[in-house]
Amino acid sequence: MEKFTQLTGVAAPMPAINIDTDKIFPAIHLRTIKRTGLAKHLFEEIRFRADGSENPDFILNQGPYRQAKIIVAGDNFGCGSSREHAPWALTDFGISCVIAPSFADIFYNNCFKNGLLPIALPQAEVDKLMDDAKKGGNAVLTIDLDKQTISRPDGEIVPFAIDPFRKHCMLNGLDDIGLTEQKAAEIATYETKTRGERPWVFGLTEKAGA
Amino acid sequence: MAQPRTLFDKIWDSHVIAPAGEGTYLLYIDLHLCHEVTTPQAFEGLKLAGRKVRRPDATIAVADHNIPTSNRKAGIDEPESKLQVDTLERNVVEFGVPYIPIDSINQGIVHIIGPEMGLSQPGMTIVCGDSHTATHGALGALAFGIGTSEVEHVLATQTLIQAHAKNMLVEVNGSLGAGVSPKDVILAIIGKIGTAGGTGHVIEYGGSTFRSMSMEGRMTVCNMAIESGARAGLVAPDEITFEYVKGRAYAPKGGAWEQALAYWKTLPSDPGAHFDKKTSLDAGQIAPHITWGTNPEQTAPITARVPDPADIDDPLKRAAVERALQYMQLKPKTPLVEIPVQRVFIGSCTNSRIEDLRAAAAIARGRKVAEGVRAMVVPGSGLVKHQAEEEGLDRVFLEAGFEWREPGCSNCMSMNPDRAMKGERIASTSNRNFEGRQGPGAKTHLMGPAMAAAAAVTGRLADVRQLG
Ligand code: SF4
């Protein structure tokens, strides 16, 4: 995974609440075995018209927002399906950060595995950033993960909170699996102990013929 | 005395291997269910890194989303669907993962077959790259959906790095009125707490209504825990649970059964255990529910009318309702029972178990699907289909003009050919009414199986209680 340190860019305002992962990445395109090249289906149903042409009303089809690196969104962003295709499509489009009052749990987890930074802030702070975002190319935001700050175009600094372990992994581009493998001995000890306590859950899927 | 703990706390504590960082833990996973949609990139990741599947004996795979529900023998027509299923079949061979083939009677929707085969058991941690994994929580297991990177993590290490969720109790007491089903209970709950009401929490469904509910009903309820944002849904294991698990293909037998049973009985929440959040509903007040909008909190009793955005003060909520009504092409204040439907879907991991099919068949019996309506019944698994046919339910449906199909996800998410036609309005027993989920422009109304059957025979949203 690439390291995430600082990011400066245009933010696209998407004030709607409950933007779900079906909307971010439609189900029909889940029929892929790849995790790359998915930006073409990002927000497809609202981004394109029935004839395949761009819908000019959709924010990411407008001027500076085509280069947006940040989305400022409404409450409960990423709700619904667990599909990681949603963060894959967002990062493939060039989005590296989503700011919202709240996120759905699975989407939030998925973001960190893909170098996409989800920042949850109180509604009042999000409202200010939403106003900045509406100014398009005239107002870029700068996000500093190490300092945990967002710099607004007027110079105001908005601090944000993040779990220290996730921050560490993101700053250093660490692979979770590699980290967990360092705990191999503890995992093996746990397995031995559990095999004694709850033997019936071991070998479970091999017990009967399918 | 030890601190009283919730069911969730107990399962969590017994699966923590070690702290992983501030506030996060390395959690052991007992059972990993895999399907074709969310695993190809995970297996690819393993391959690239030269990793193996750590515990194939705790892993099982099935194809359910993409497969056609008619003429199975002809294979899969749509090339993308075929590639995904072929990829799964190659990966299970390469990595030695047990697999349930498409032509097996055990094949079905992953969340139907886990409990049905006795794989999902109380006290376990169960994951799947699928948000409706919460279904298995009906057995008193901690079951939750994960993304594909986490699927890869579990395949490689049999563990996950997780933050401890909070505890939430949703209590429903009393008996359900005639014609009111578990689906109505969960729709009413989501309507009350909202699509983010459970975010960051594991919900335990408690109270007398759940205590007397069948396992099938509890699965319908837990299935939709995610629709209120919850990490997982749980029902404490009891005699109904044990009776259900006993004798199933993968369930413990003999001495192991006795040992397991003794353990399972220790799992229910202790009296006085702390819940961070609580809410309650009175079962007697719950009427048959449907959704009128484009997310599962936009529900109403069938006796109500389409809401009027003008009555909503919060501007963001009002905008969301306006947008939903525009998409659903509904006028404010229209009585719900006057809304015509073109399609009916009875199936999905929410409502395709034998009880669901019995409830729908009871309404379909001796009636006819209304003119201009296409109605589909898609059993959740080969075993459900077989049992329904033993009971003659297939004849009831076919005589009434419903289609009787092969098991799979089907029109729930439209990855296979069963998707709705452009803009059709659907009465559906599935779990999500998001824009476009059942087909481009498709307008979904969620409801229970008897209500969906009532919509099929009347050609409109209908109150099943009026059909008798
Ligand atoms: S039936 Fe629907 S919700 Fe359930 S697993 Fe299949 S696609 Fe997902």
Image (cartoon, coloured by chain):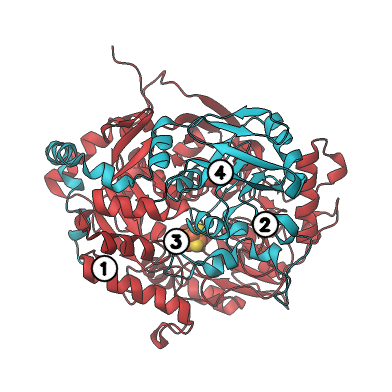
Q: Are marks 4 and 3 in contact (CB under 8 Å)?
A: no
Rendered location of residue B336, percent (x, y): 78, 55
Instruction: Tell me the amino acid under the disc marked 3.
Output: Ile
Residue underneath mark 1: B92
Chain letter of the cyan region: A
Which residue: 28% across, 74% down? B90
Q: Are marks 3 and 2 on the same chain?
A: yes
Residue underneath mark 2: B464
Q: Chain of mark 4?
A: A
Instruction: Tell me the amino acid under the disc marked 2.
Output: Val
Rendered location of residue B46, percent (x, y): 28, 60
Chain letter of the red region: B
Mark 2 element type: helix
Give me the C-alpha separation between circle 4 and circle 1.
Answer: 40 Å
Mark 3 element type: helix
Q: Chain of mark 3?
A: B
Residue underneath mark 3: B354
Q: Chain of mark 2?
A: B
Circle nearer the N terminus (3, 2): 3
Give me the C-alpha separation between circle 3 and circle 1.
Answer: 30 Å
Give me the C-alpha separation between circle 3 and circle 2.
Answer: 19 Å
